[in-house]
Every structure is written in C-alpha cells, then in structure tokens.
Image: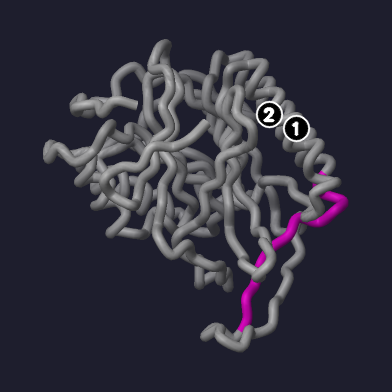
Amino acid sequence: MAGTEYASPLLQFVPHDHSGPTVIALARLQLTMDAFEVREFEKDADDVDAHRRLWAMKRDAVPEVRERYMRTIEAARAQGANIVVFGEMTYPALGRLEEDEPFEKQLQECADAYGMHVVAGSSHQVQAPPAQRYNMSRIFVPQADKPFEQKKHISAHRTGEIVDIPPVPRVTVLGMAGCNYGVIICADATDGNLSRQIGKQNGDDGQCYRPIHVLMCPSFSYSSAMFDRAHVFANQAQAHVAIVNGLDDPGVGICALYRPGLGAPPLDPFHEDDELSVYHVKDFSLPVRRVAAV
C-alpha cells in the first residue's frame, strides 16, 4: 500500500474506501511509571544535548500489557469500532525483532480479521545504523504488508525526553469508514506551525487533495494542560483531535474527542467503561474539497 504525496511535504495520503460509519474507540489503558525503566545515552560527538533519556517498558510488564491490548481490541470490536487508539508509551515492545514480531503479527491479524485500524500507541525505539532514537507509533491497517509508522515531531523536554526529529515533518493520512485521519504524538499538539499547516490544507484554498477529519493524539502526560493544547490544535487545524493519555495519574484526564470551534465542548462518548471510550461520529463538519485522482 503506497502513499501519494500532498503538495505540502507535511502530509502523505493513503487511498481508502469511505463507506460506513466512523466508530472510534479510545483505550483507557493507563500505566504507572513503575512499568518503565529509564535508559540514558551518552552525548554523541555531534550532539548538542548532554544526554538522551528514553523509556523502555520493563520485561516483566510486557506480557500483561500485551494481554490488555488484545482484550481492549476485542472490546472495541464488540462495540463496532473500526478504529482503536492506544496511549503514548503503551506499545509493549521488548526491543528485539524475534521477541516483538509475534505480537506485531497478532495485531495485524486483528486488523485483517476485523477490518479495523489499530493505532498502537507509541514507544521509544533505537534504529541503527546510524543510531537514531525515535518516539514512534505503529498503525496497523487491514491487508497491509507492514504497519505504517509515525514519528514524533517534538521532544517532551520537560520530562527529559530527547528524540531525533525527522528532517521533514510528515503526517501520514490514513482512512477508515467516513474519515481521513492522521497521528500526532503528545507534545506534537503544542506545534502551532503543524496545526496551522493542516488548517491551511483543510481550508478553502485548493491546496489539499482531501481534508483531514481527525488527528489521533496518543499522549503520556502528567499535565491536564495537554488536553487544553489538544483543543487548541483542533481549532487551528480545523480538525477533530482525539487525545488518549497512557499515564495513570488521577489528576489528569484519560481521553477526549475535541471538535474544532472556540468554546466547543468535547464530544460525549456513545459508550464508556473501564476499558474504552467509544465515539460514533456521523458528521465531521468539514467542507468537502476537490479530490485528486488516486
């Protein structure tokens, strides 16, 4: 499945079928910091940062989180969801291909069997050579050869996170049922340039091939201000923003789906329980733009 370039280098589009309703399930899978270990990397010769701090899920936490992933996907399927989104840092990776590949295969099999898109949170990863350290989300879609990957554009410096940033910011735009959606990761929601660029392409200036209806925003935040930022991003991007917090903190929200518009309240979930908040979205309230042949 290949992407078609937008006029802007920010966005990449993947053709899809627009039939059917849009049912988005946001996973209420929250983890404590006890599930992680911090890995420090020494300063590289050409690196301006004194150190790089990445988080890795502890080995003994991974099996339980993987089981919770599968239960959540089954619960999402039971609610008729065609997109399920997990929080930042909740992807249960061990960091070795032979150990992680069977779980990836499970997720792909779910996507294929259920006709579902799975936005599998994110995790810190080291890709070599050369050593590049990313915060990356995997998106599993039906009948794909491999998951799509979305890299974080902005490091969360307040938490000590310093990751490599792609030289050209890119949001891959996928489609399921009645919507086009992209993925931004936590601090990306503070990027006014990115939100305004998306808003420009969603605007009536003939620049985009298709509008972006929803930005999925896996987060791992101690601050409820991230939810405010997600709402601002929705207004500037002229798109809905679904934020999913993967951190278990009683003082911070878990998930919400914001619509664009000053003062617009978040949407009410169609269904909510301990595992999921499920939203049926019939109208994204965005104008239909001209569509390029794909």
Task: Name the residue nearer the viewer: 86 or 116.
Answer: 116
Secondary structure state at the residue bearing disc 2: helix
Q: Which residue is mark 1?
A: 105
* Residue 134 belongs to magenta span: no
Q: Residue at x 46, y 43 (%)?
A: 183
Q: Provide the residue span drawn in magenta.
A: 51-62
Q: Position of residue 127 (x, y in %)?
A: 67, 61
Q: Confirm or deny contact between disc 2 and disc 1 (CB under 8 A).
A: yes
**Of all residues shown, which one is farthest toward the top?**
20
Is residue 265 visible in this depiction of the protein?
no
Q: Position of residue 193 (x, y in %)?
A: 28, 59
Q: Which residue is mark 2?
A: 108
Q: Residue at x 37, y 35 (%)?
A: 214
- CA separation, marks 2 and 1? 5 Å
* Residue 56 belongs to magenta span: yes
Quarter assignment of residue 76? top right
Determine whether, in the image, residue 38 is placed left or right of residue 250. right
